[in-house]
Amino acid sequence: MKMVVAVVQDKDSNKLADALVDRNYRATKLATTGGFLKAGNTTFMIGVEDHQVEGVLDLIKENCQSRSQLVAPVSPMGGNADAYVPYPVEVEVGGATVFVLPVEHFQQF
């Protein structure tokens, strides 16, 4: 058995949740916040049998696409404000960060 932990952007979370339900995968959704953009994410915890891992990874890949987004940089704290340029910066967001972990023991009550 494996635990698939997928951190996805909030914009993709409903689409992924619907796809998981349609394929009868059980998942727990957690509201999380990313450290770099300080933006909302959703972390899915999906427990599956070993042979189901590839199917779950394919669903995540199909439903969580990366995209470009303009973000305003955060002003430096305590730094030289003269060199600070407050222009938006284009960054890649979305997609998914996925961890597949072995599960030693599982119980359901």
Image: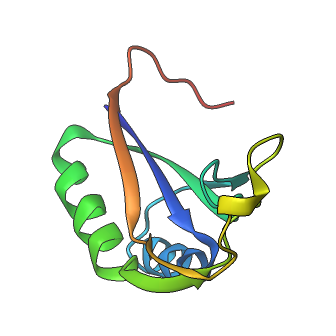
Quadrant of the rendered structure where residue 54 is? Answer: bottom left
Q: Position of residue 18 (x, y in %)?
A: 53, 81
The image quadrant where one finds the C terminus is: top right
Q: Position of residue 17 (x, y in %)?
A: 55, 73
Residue in the foreground of this view, choosing between 105 and 97: 97
44 and 37: which is toward the camera: 37
- Residue located at (55% from left, 54% from top): 44
Q: Check the image and report above or below for 56 versus 5.
A: below
User: Is residue 80 shown left or right of residue 22?
Assistant: right
Residue 85 position within the rendered picture, expressed as x and y whole percent measured from the top left: 65, 72
**Extreme-top residue of the structure:** 104
| Number of numbered markers | 0
As drawn, the residue found furthest toward the front would be 82
- Residue 72 % position (x, y): 68, 76
Q: Nearer the viewer, residue 80 or 108?
A: 80
Question: Which quadrant of the figure has residue 100?
Answer: top left
Question: In front here: 65 or 81?
Answer: 81
Quarter location, residue 11: bottom right
Residue at 44% x, 61% y is 25
Compared with residue 107, is residue 52 higher up or lower down, i.e. above or below? Answer: below
Vertical position of residue 91 compared to residue 98: above or below: below
Above or below: residue 30 compared with residue 73: above
